[in-house]
Amino acid sequence: MKAIYITQAGGPEVLQYKEYQLPQLQQHEVQIAVRAAGVNRSDILTRNNPDAYGGGTPKAQIPGLEVAGEVLAVGEQVKQFEVGDAVCALVPGGGYATHSNVDARLCLPVPEGLSYTEAAALPEVVFTVWFNVFQQAKAKEDEGLLIHGGTSGIGVMGLQIAKALGLKTFTTVGSQEKLDFIEEHQLAKGINYKETAFEEVFKEDKIDVILDMVGGDYTHKNLELLHTQGRLIHINGMKSLTPQIDLWTVMSKQLILSGSLLKPQPIEIKERIAEDVKEKVWPLLASGQVKPIIHKVFKLEEAAQAHQLMESSAHIGKIILENSDS
């Protein structure tokens, strides 16, 4: 068995393809022959600081938070899956590998009609969107949702799910190519933030929920833009994690500020997300209303090149690692 290891903190060059000894399968786990794994910005943060961002987990030195593949073995307590089942799963690390032992509660069947490569693009982004937008912010039909970074993996998936569930969607992107993609697929009312101020363009629209990964000076603009009783949800702070805000805006408009990190959530929280996702989102994937958008596929041993692409922010949708040896 082989895996991509973070050999030390640093750039993409610290990722190395090495032999991997899979731990003994636990009673509540399934063993997956990993056919594909998703690449996420969280993996970059783990690579830059594996001790801190890895959270001290046993798999901290092997990045990867989502996989898809075939079940090779099941633990004694596992009743919902059998050997040979096609599954995708949210994992706490260790996804960049040929094999993975995964808590069965975080596994879902590969949606009908999707390949392993497409299924590997789902768990991290779908869980993140559902947890933040629908469980925490309680977004509902006919409300307005703004997602910054609409062509990121989370952005593309979030806009599709929201639109399918009857929300009005808005987004910001960083190039004309990305704006063309949003318009071509009719995902949202969008703007190029490098040319247009989103707080001006969207001020006449009713924005009830904002999913933000930018932070910094976007925070005050988001609060000003939100409608009364709006909800601002943070999942990153790529500009800054320490913005200044006007509390009068928060109080006078009865706004709610929240945020989360998915990776350290207790298994019980992730299990509830999985249950909701299977009930509410999987049918949208099976019907074709929501589709995984994949920008580029790399071989597992090409993880460094995949990270370089992720850091460039030139991609639209997901970046996937495929494994032909599992």
Image (cartoon, grey):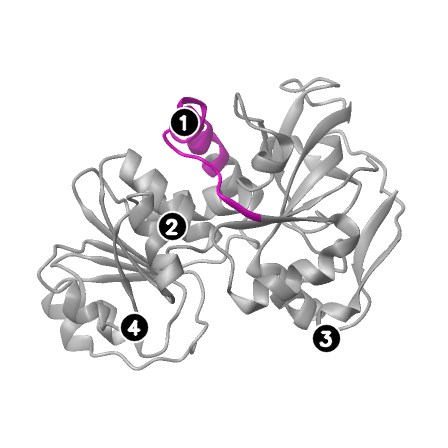
The residue to which callout 3 is attached is 10
Residue sitting at 26 percent across and 44 percent down?
Answer: 139
Residue 263 part of the magenta-drawn span:
no
Residue 278 part of the magenta-drawn span:
yes
**The image quarter in which residue 63 lies:** bottom right
Q: Secondary structure at mark 3?
A: loop
Q: Nearer the viewer, residue 218 or 254?
A: 218
The tag earlier along the polypeptide, 2 or 1, is 2
10 Å crowding of disc 1: few (<14), some (14-19), many (20+): few
Instruction: Give the Cα separation between the discs numbered 2 and 3.
Output: 30 Å
Q: Nearer the viewer, residue 115 or 224?
A: 115
Residue sitting at 51 percent across and 58 percent down?
Answer: 315
Give amino acid for label 1.
Gly
- Apparent side of residue 311 relative to residue 174 in the rendered image (left or right): right
The residue to which callout 2 is attached is 132
Residue range corresponding to the magenta coloring? 273-295
The tag earlier along the polypeptide, 1 or 3, is 3
The residue to which callout 4 is attached is 219
Residue sitting at 28 percent across and 74 percent down?
Answer: 195
